[in-house]
Image (cartoon, rainbow, N blue to C red):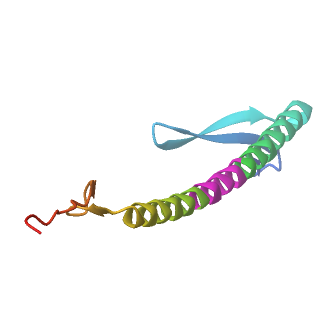
Amino acid sequence: MAWETRSRGTRYYTRSRRVSGRVEREYVGTGPLAELMAEADAEDRAQTLVQRATLDAEQQRLAELDSQGARLSELVDALASGALLLAGYRRHDRGDWRKRREYQVHGS
């Protein structure tokens, strides 16, 4: 969005927008109506910036929660592994947990 001045000194307001990958300029006009349109466009841009900042803050908050959740999951896995080892289980080839066999001695 821009105010431009022609060679005769006349100011006019235009909007730029992207259509099919190309930037097209739209002539809005001059005078009080163009002033109102320029103010409305500026308010829209400001609102978009606020929304973007809010979204960025929310994404950062969710990323921190995700990181904390991953850390908690690691700690729970370590605690569960320790409990299973103490209970006599083992992991076969880094797969399922299996109870160790207890062998009996015959003939004593």
Q: Give the range drawn in magenta.
A: 55-67
Q: Residue at x 7, y 66 (%)?
A: 107
Q: Residue at x 37, y 66 (%)?
A: 85
Which image quarter: residue 94?
bottom left
Q: Does 76 appear above or below 40?
A: below
Which image quarter: residue 23?
top right
User: Is residue 51 visible to the viewer in this orientation of the structure?
Assistant: yes
Q: Nearer the viewer, residue 45 or 3?
A: 45
* 53 sits left or right of 38 in the view: left
Residue 58 sits inside the magenta stretch: yes
Q: Quadrant of the C terminus?
A: bottom left
The percent position of residue 98, horizontal first and vertical second, equals: 26, 55
Residue 47 sits inside the magenta stretch: no
The percent position of residue 70, horizontal first and vertical second, equals: 52, 59
Q: Does 94 appear above or below 31?
A: below
Q: Which of 61 and 68 is in front in this view?
A: 68
Q: Which residue is drawn at 16% across and 62% down?
A: 104
Residue at far left of view: 107
* 30 sits left or right of 107 in the view: right
Which image quarter: residue 68?
bottom right
Q: Does 6 appear above or below 82?
A: above
Helix, strand or loop: magenta stretch:
helix
Q: Quadrant of the N terminus?
A: top right
The percent position of residue 87, horizontal first and vertical second, equals: 39, 61
User: Is residue 6 visible to the viewer in this orientation of the structure?
Assistant: no
